[in-house]
Image (cartoon, helix red, strand yellow):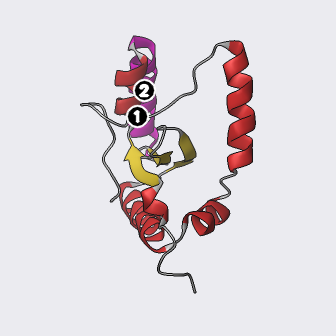
Amino acid sequence: MTSSLSPRARSEYAATVVTPASFGRRHGRISRALGNVRSAVTRIRRSHSSVGTLAVIRRSNGAFVVNVDAGTREHADDLLHLVREQLATMTVAQFERAWGIDRQVDRVIQRHLDGGGVEPVVAPISGRRALPSAG
């Protein structure tokens, strides 16, 4: 049992389902065109109609720490509900262990990215393009 004084994971992380359309708005015309082709092929095949990607985002810097296929609308809703429940009930350390989030790896990757002048991919944490909060 965890102490009631331990901070919950939702104080540090947020979860949302990111649709392919939102990726297109952020990354330009080519991504939008590829997204349109992908959605058209998906409608034709009807084998796996994923609604997007489940993303867990670090609140402090907007970095994506978990990025998995959300599946169908029903599966995405269930998965998002489960992750948000875990964020509300687990401590930060428990949540990171459960989802395999390794802060040491984040530091190593950031150090290498800083050296090359390449910016990490981050979700906007404020403004009109900000993702909805899990809290």
Label 1 packing within 10 angstroms: few (<14), some (14-19), many (20+): some
Answer with mark 2 or mark 1, whichever residue precedes in sequence: 1
* Mark identifier at residue 35: 2
Q: Is residue 66 above or below residue 30?
A: below
Horizontal placement of 127 versus 109: left or right? Answer: left
Circle 2: residue type: Gly
In the foreground, 76 or 84: 84
Residue 47 in sight: no
Horizontal placement of 1 versus 133: left or right? Answer: right
Q: Going 46% across and 40% down the picture, which residue do you hit? A: 45
Residue furthest front as drawn: 5
Q: Going 40% across and 15% down the picture, which residue do you hit? A: 28
In the foreground, 42 or 61: 61
Which quadrant holds residue 126? top left
Residue 49 x %, y %: 43, 46
Query: Does the CB distance between marks 2 and 1 fall below 8 Å?
Result: yes
Query: Which range of residues does the magenta coloring cover?
Result: 29-47
Residue 7 x %, y %: 48, 67
State the residue position of label 1: 20
Element under disc 2: helix
Kindly report which numbered mark, 2 or 1, lies closer to the viewer in this rendering: 1
The answer for how far apart the CA atoms under marks 2 and 1 are is 6 Å
